[in-house]
Amino acid sequence: MTVLPVIARELRASARQPFTYYLRVLGVTALLLAGALFGLEVGFKPALGHELFAALHCALFGAIWLLVPMLTADCISRERREGTLGLLFMTSLKGRDIVVAKGLAHGLRAGTLGVAVVPVLTIPFLLGGVSWIEALLAVLINANAMCWALAAGLLASAWGKAWHRTLLGAALLAFTFFLLYQTVTGWLLLWTLRMGRPYVSGMNWNPGLAVGFGFCTMTSWFGRGYVAWSSSVRQFFFVLGQSTVCSLLVLLWAVLAAGAKTRRHWQEEPPSRRQLWWRQTFCTPVLWLGFFRRWMRRKLERNPIGWLEQRTWSGRLVTWSWFAVLVSVYSLALTDRSFFQNANGLHGVLAWLLAGSMALSAAGSFRRERETGVLELLLVSPLGENQIIMGRLVGLWSQFAPAVGLLLAVWAYCSTFMPAGGDARAVLFFLVAFLTVPVFGLYFSLSCRNSSLRSCPRHCGSGAAAGFA
């Protein structure tokens, strides 16, 4: 079969990528952290083995949805950027063959995550209270989640080219599939167990989502001790069997859709007439053109490296989109009378999302220059290395300054005048995070070879080994 050499090629390439090993470390670290938090809150008692197992399973379930889409988000788009996708189509391979090879290789990489965390998952068994039924249910639930997460990464990689766009698309698809998977599983449970209206009447507008989330994360009546002695064990496995069939069908559909998309758009094509119209209508400045030109010229003269980050409409869109989102969210939240009683959660979620966006922008900043060859031109210019780095840092800080300033100002206001609405220490923590996250992002942007989190250049590895020696 022609697809077997492609699978072998992908496995060899994956074996040389440091992220393959970092993935296992991240998974084990997440479970150890969840176990440590559980021990600090509840303690490690022999009777709480199933409680600890539920907490560790929940951490692994979340790590799958977070790490697997990130792992597969750039598997096809990288080939399109590097121009090697056309070489694969010179053989007898079809689009779905390439996607199948990519999916199997990255699915095996993701499967090593489950194998790496097995020693940590044995701790609840040593404490006692965990049955083989709960363990088997956890395995099936995580396998289904891996199918959905893998499908999200493959679809995003087939529909995109730029690394940051495919990563963002994979995150959005993974979140959508996460909600869909919980909803499907929950309604299958409600239908199979014949639960009536009295059980679901006290839930929210989507009882299937609530029931599915509680069952898949083992954080509700379904996942704790009930499964061990329930008389409906066969019904639970019947529901998971149906859910597994749905997961495999979704993965099959994703492979076929990604293969068809890869076959149709494997090479770079000029923008269509509709794309040109959208770009001309919605992405071209039409108001205050004189002010806009003077403003961009001033940025170019003061910080040419930062100007490269904001010269395109997409870079400016990131700045003002976040500002508009924060204004809209806070305008809606301030209409609620109980906002200042539970404002910490909203501030924290917005701060983490904004910090993640900054990390993505910083990690992909110098990658664009390296791919287009602009970085070589910058290195032969009169600007020194320190000026290039500081110019890009200042550009990233100024790009997110409006949104960060608004977020921290509202948060500080809540912390100062309304103690129930904020925390000064959290404000200080995120202020330091916003200043340091671009630094780490630029470091990884320059240390890694390309945007797919592959291995660094060979001389970097030898230099690091020499430094340790």
Image (tube, rainbow, N blue to C red):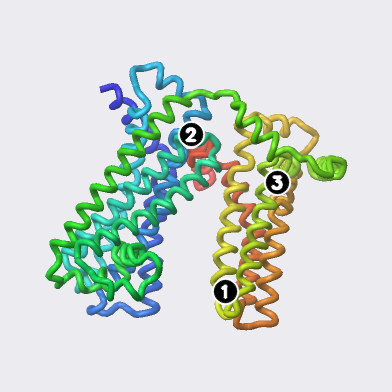
Decide: is 202 above or below 362.
below
Which residue in the structure is indicated by mark 1? Answer: 344
Q: Secondary structure at mark 2?
A: helix
Image x and y of residue 162, in percent: 55, 37
| Viewer-closest of 267 and 60 | 267
Q: Disc 3 marks which amino acid?
A: Arg
Three-letter code, disc 1 = Asn
Name which quarter of the figure residue 423 lies in: bottom right
Label 3, label 1: how many angstroms apart (C-alpha)? 29 Å
Distance from label 3 to label 2 (Cα)? Answer: 24 Å
Question: Residue 77's mark?
Answer: 2
Q: Is the residue marked by circle 1 packed among few (<14), some (14-19), or many (20+) residues within 10 Å?
A: some
Per the rendering, the mark at residue 316 is: 3
> Which one is in front in this view, the residue at disc 3 or the one at disc 2?
3
Q: Amino acid at mark 2?
A: Ser
Residue at 30% across / 61% down in the picture?
A: 186
* Vertical placement of residue 82 versus 425, above or below: above
Q: Secondary structure at mark 1?
A: helix
Pointer 3 or 2: first along the chain: 2
Q: Decide: marks 3, 2 in contact (CB < 8 A)?
A: no
In this view, the residue in front, 37 or 176, is: 176
Name the side, left or right, on which 172 lies relative to 41. Answer: right
Element under disc 3: helix
Q: Tell me how far mark 1 sits from mark 2, CA to CA.
A: 38 Å
Residue 218 picture quarter? bottom left
Q: Is residue 432 left or right of residue 28?
A: right
Where on the picture, by quarter, is residue 154?
top left
